[in-house]
Amino acid sequence: MKKGTIALIAHDSKKDELVEFVAQNRAWFIGFSLVGTGTTGGRIAEQGIDIECLASGPLGGDAQIAARITEGNVHAVIFFRDPMGKHPHEPDINMLLRQCDVHNIPLATNLATAQLLTANQAFKRG
């Protein structure tokens, strides 16, 4: 039985890093249902990992994940962000980050915090 749902998102310059992280930690991720924004989810699916793909971030995927958080259907978010880039869908990104804070959802925005999340024994037990 799956423990919960993890949302996976990455800005373009971080997609390779997230795909590699998920592939390296496949054994941890298979214990969860996965959902991702369009391109990121597609890249993860190419690795043979089961993931539900929503719209791409700029086309509303970030908002879709934020809505699922609000509904209680996402239990953690791993969002490898590019802090140096400008993104036309910045309001959606900020809304997603806000919903993580409002609903007390673990949010990993870089490799270091994602490693902490996947190593956390309490989170593994659900």
Image (tube, helix red, strand yellow):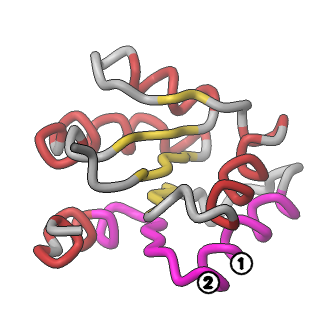
- The residue that label 1 is drawn on is 98
> Magenta segment, which residues?
90-114
Q: Is residue 85 magenta?
A: no
The label on residue 112 is none
Residue 25 location (% of width, % of height)? 17, 45
Verify CB contact (< 8 Å) between mark 1 and mark 2. yes
Q: Is residue 108 magenta?
A: yes
What amino acid type should be assigned to the residue bearing mark 1?
Answer: Arg
Considering depth in this image, is 73 or 6 the residue closer to the camera? Answer: 73
39 displayed left or right of 94: left
**Dot 1 surroundings within 10 Å: few (below 14), some, or many (20 or more)?**
some
- Residue 40 point in image, percent of width and height: 53, 32
Quadrant of the drawing holding the N terminus: top left
Per the image, label 2 sits on a secondary structure element best described as: helix
Secondary structure of the residue carrying tag 1 is helix
Q: Relative to 61, is 18 on the left or the right?
A: left
Percent x, y of residue 49? 30, 24
- Could you tell me how many numbered marks the image carries? 2
According to the image, label 2 marks what residue?
101
Residue type beneath disc 2: Asp
How far from the left and from the top, in percent, is residue 28? 16, 48
Does 48 appear above or below 101?
above
Q: Residues within 10 Å of mark 2 (few under 14, many from 20)?
A: few
Residue 93 occupies which quadrant of the picture? bottom right
